[in-house]
Amino acid sequence: MCGEPPFPRDRLAGIGDEAAPGLDGQLAALGRLGWGALELRSVDGTAVADLDDGTFRDAAERVRDAGLDVVCLASRIGNWARPVTGPFADDLAELDILAERCHALDCRYVRIMSYPNDGLAEPEWAARAIDRVGCLADRAEQAGLTLLHENCAGWAGDRADRMLRLVREVGSPALRLLFDTGNGVPHGYDAFGTLEKVLPHVAHVHVKDAVRAPDGTVAYTLPGDGHARVADSLRLLLETGYTGTFSLEPHLAFRPHEEPDARDGTQDPFVEAGRRLERVLARLAPYARPAAVPEGARR
């Protein structure tokens, strides 16, 4: 590491509620890292879209006072708790609220997924998921936003061919892909191989790492210590001209969507993971190839 220049910190962000439930802890963790951007998902256990107006205004002011940009709002649209047979009105309403909040935060990106199945045959599941994401993308485009589909839950969550079909059939500049380096380990697929196939459509990156034991249990690790080929993925992105943000989601302090009561307020594991990510990226920086900012990338 000696002699290696640091990776530009203006390209690093963190999903705040991975560090602490409250905004004070989230801002403190990013302050300790010296990073300039936050990805917002929840505050004190409440999703961004569910915050009352006064609480949201206060949060937005505190983020601005801390000198941070908000690079993405991580929504619940199409996620593991919202199957494709559920009420679509919930997702439309959430997007409408997040559109207003994105404008207030000068943020362009909203993270979505593509709807878990609920007993439908695959062709019907596919048709409904694509139709819903298409409707959402139309609404996002009208609002000047870009939806980022994550390789996680839903019809297109774990297969490159479905991700590519989703992007192709929706056919909107308001739909891009979010690649999470670590999701392949818990979901049982080759994330690096997926990245190789969908690379031109990736506009945002989450970084985590994990190991899977012989008994199938999964444990999360510092970036680079697990089975997710984090360094390989980041190198490939840099070599091919990715100019977007790397957003830390280490799943080490706690995972709000899985462990709502496991909140001790500490951000040390998050900060440790952030320092490790900086070191990994610093080693990979010589491989970075300058490129034009892709359509829909962070302003």
Image (spheres, rainbow, N blue to C red):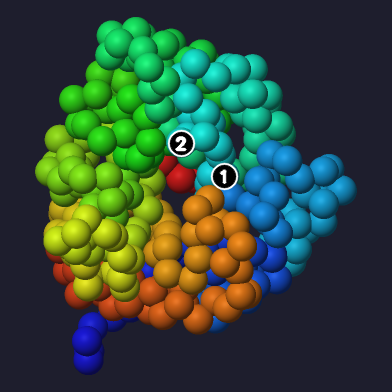
Residue furthest to the right: 54
Q: Which residue shows up at 58% across the image and 50% down it?
A: 41
- The local crowd at label 2, few if under 14, some if 14 to 19, many if 20 or more residues have their Cα within 10 Å, is some
**In the rendered view, would you say 223 is above or below 215?**
below
The first of marks 1 and 2 along the sequence is 1
Residue nearer the viewer, 199 or 294: 199
Q: Which residue shows up at 52% across the image and 34% down it?
A: 81
User: How many numbered dots are placed on residues in this image?
Assistant: 2
Residue nearer the viewer, 4 or 266: 266
Q: Which residue shows up at 38% across the image and 36% down it?
A: 153
Disc 2 target residue: 80
- Across and down, in percent, residue 249 comes to 43, 60
**The N terminus sits in image quarter:** bottom left
Q: Is residue 234 visible?
A: no
| Amino acid type, mark 2 | Trp
**In the rendered view, would you say 131 is above or below 290?**
above
Disc 1 target residue: 73
**In the rendered view, would you say 92 is above or below 198?**
above
| Amino acid type, mark 1 | Leu
Q: Quadrant of residue 177?
A: top left
**In the rendered view, would you say 163 is above or below 252?**
above
